[in-house]
Amino acid sequence: MTRTRLTATERQEQLIAAAIQAFSQSGYAGTTTDQVARLAGVSQPYVIRLFRTKQELFLAAVQHAGNRIEAKWRKAAEEEPTLESLGRAYKDLLQQPELVTMLLHGFGAASDPAIGDPVRTCFGRLYDVVRELTGASNEEARDFFAFGMLLTCLGGMRLVGPDAVPPQPWAADLLGTFENLT
């Protein structure tokens, strides 16, 4: 059986996918490039050759998560350029818990200046995209992101999305305030 070699772009995408899985489980401080390499089936020196540092790999994973959200929103806006449409698209992304958890780890690591600036830029780009696609006011965009951050936190706690845990009473009450969340 002949094995097909991956292109450099395909290998980079494979490493970012492995990084998202590893970082979403253990965070920035708790993840090593060796763990990412093992998940991707490559050597740790290869990871370093492509990304130079764990920090650059982490930022690539955060950027990938942001890009996935932006792409999903742009596609949704092609059919219906409203906050509701973008909200439904984000709800679909909650079915990929590692993606939202990756964002949460990015926000949590943002106190490091080398991580914080790119994470804030990523978040700001998403804010601008929402306003561009929907024409939302500052206040409407704020409310949209506040609602989305609550969903992101609930997703990070595994209260929504696949493999959701049974909610405690407070969570059941809160989840009951959402329309069509399941």
Image (cartoon, rainbow, N blue to C red):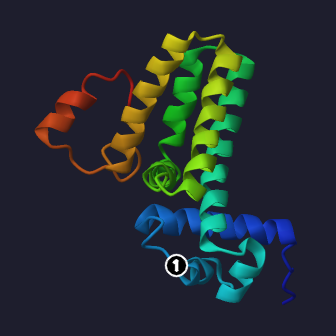
Q: In this view, does 89 lie to the left or right of 153?
A: right
Q: In this view, does 105 lie to the left or right of 39?
A: left
User: Picture quarter containing residue 51?
Assistant: bottom right
The residue at the point 51 percent across, 69 percent down is 22
Q: Nearer the viewer, residue 23 or 123?
A: 123
- The residue positioned farthest toward the front in the image shown: 113
Q: Would residue 43 be visible to someone looking at this image?
A: no
Q: Which of 58 and 163 is in front in this view?
A: 58
Q: Which of 54 and 149 is in front in this view?
A: 54
Please tell me whether residue 3 is drawn above or below residue 133 in the rendered image. below
Please tell me whether residue 127 is drawn above or below residue 16 in the rendered image. above
Q: In this view, does 73 lie to the left or right of 99?
A: right
Coordinates of residue 63 in the picture (x, y in percent): 66, 50
The type of residue carrying mark 1 is Thr
Q: Is residue 133 left or right of residue 18?
A: right
Coordinates of residue 137 in the picture (x, y in percent): 57, 9
The residue at the point 64 percent across, 40 percent down is 121
Please tell me whether residue 53 is drawn above or below residue 71 in the rendered image. below
Coordinates of residue 61 in the picture (x, y in percent): 62, 58
The residue at the point 33 percent across, 50 percent down is 158
The residue at the point 67 percent across, 59 percent down is 60
Coordinates of residue 13 in the picture (x, y in percent): 73, 64
Quick one: SS at disc 1? loop
State the quadrant of the N terminus: bottom right
Label tally: 1
Q: Would residue 175 be visible to someone looking at this image?
A: yes
State the quadrant of the C terminus: top left
Please tell me whether residue 159 is drawn above or below residue 163 in the rendered image. above
The residue that label 1 is drawn on is: 32
How many other residues sit within 10 Å of disc 1, few (<14), some (14-19) or many (≥20)? Answer: some
